[in-house]
Image: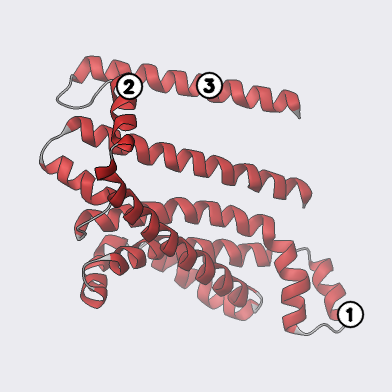
Amino acid sequence: MNRMNVRRALYTAAFLAALLILWQAMYAAFGPRVLTPPWTTFVNAWNMLRMPDYWPDIAESVRAFLIALAIAFGLGMVGGLLIGVWRACAEVFEPLLVNINTVPKVALYPVILLIFGLGMWSKVVFGALHGVIPIMISTIGAVRNVNPIYVRCGRTMHLTRGQMLRRIWVPACVPEIFSGLRLGFSLTLLGTIFGEFFASQKGVGFLLMNAIDLRNIPTIMSLILILVVFAVVANSALLAVDRKLHRQA
């Protein structure tokens, strides 16, 4: 296991080094009108995080994202479990959910704005909309992949459907459900930031759109770097938990 961890760390370091080299090469090819070099971007992002003027927008985005994430996780897991335990229901709803998931969410944003208006809840709903269906589909698949021996044992013991859900399906599905939650995390973050692009007066996405309008390349690169670092660190932590759950399963 230690050897595997060392190998994984070496691969990660090599990938990051190649990424930085490519970034520097792109800067040399396109110049400051398109992007900033790596070191300058890191310094600018650090200075931005030290400035109090940006923290209200960062806090707004974090708050919207956490609310959207809670909605996506809750509805996705509960809905997926309830649909998955009824095989006939899953056969009907899973193809519908897959088809709905292919619809570009941007097309629904005007409707969301008309219902919720400008402000926090429009981007919360837009963010949750990106994550809830993938989590639900993943949860349905997790229920389907439960070892049938567990289900037969529960029926032999005459467990009710609620007891089966609580004692068999949920514990057996946890590793695969968590894998779906990791995907939902990334998609919900993406949806929340997109929601701030279109109709928001506050947030990281709002700052990014203003910087794009002004062609403020240093600010654009700094904000993108902050978002990427946050997403990578959070996803790495979730991946570590995911691997641990699958090892214990």
How far apart marks 1 and 3 lie (CA) works out to: 52 Å
**Residue to which mark 2 is pinned:** 38
* Between discs 2 and 1, the one toward the N terminus: 2
**Residue to which mark 3 is pinned:** 13
* Between discs 1 and 3, the one toward the N terminus: 3
Nearer the camera: disc 2 or disc 1 = 2
Amino acid on which disc 3 is placed? Ala
* Between discs 3 and 2, the one toward the N terminus: 3
Q: Is residue 36 left or right of residue 79?
A: left
Residue 127 versus residue 27 in the image, above or below: below
Residue found at the very far left of the displayed protein: 214
Q: Position of residue 142 (x, y in %)?
A: 65, 62
Residue 14 versus residue 137 in the image, above or below: above
Secondary structure state at the residue bearing disc 2: helix
Residue found at the very far right of the displayed protein: 157
Residue 156: which disc?
Answer: 1
Amino acid on which disc 1 is placed? Thr
Residue 63: which disc?
Answer: none
Q: Position of residue 102 (x, y in %)?
A: 38, 61
Secondary structure state at the residue bearing disc 3: helix
Residue found at the very far front of the displayed protein: 52
Between 69 and 139, the one lying in front of the other is 69
Amino acid on which disc 2 is placed? Pro
Residue 244 versus residue 166 in the image, above or below: above
Q: Position of residue 224 (x, y in %)?
A: 31, 38
Quarter of the picture holding the N terminus: top right
Q: Position of residue 195 (x, y in %)?
A: 28, 58
> Badge 2: how crowded within 10 Å, few (<14), some, or many (20+)?
some
Q: Residue at x 18, y 31 (%)?
A: 217
Q: Residue at x 29, y 54 (%)?
A: 194
Q: How many marks?
A: 3
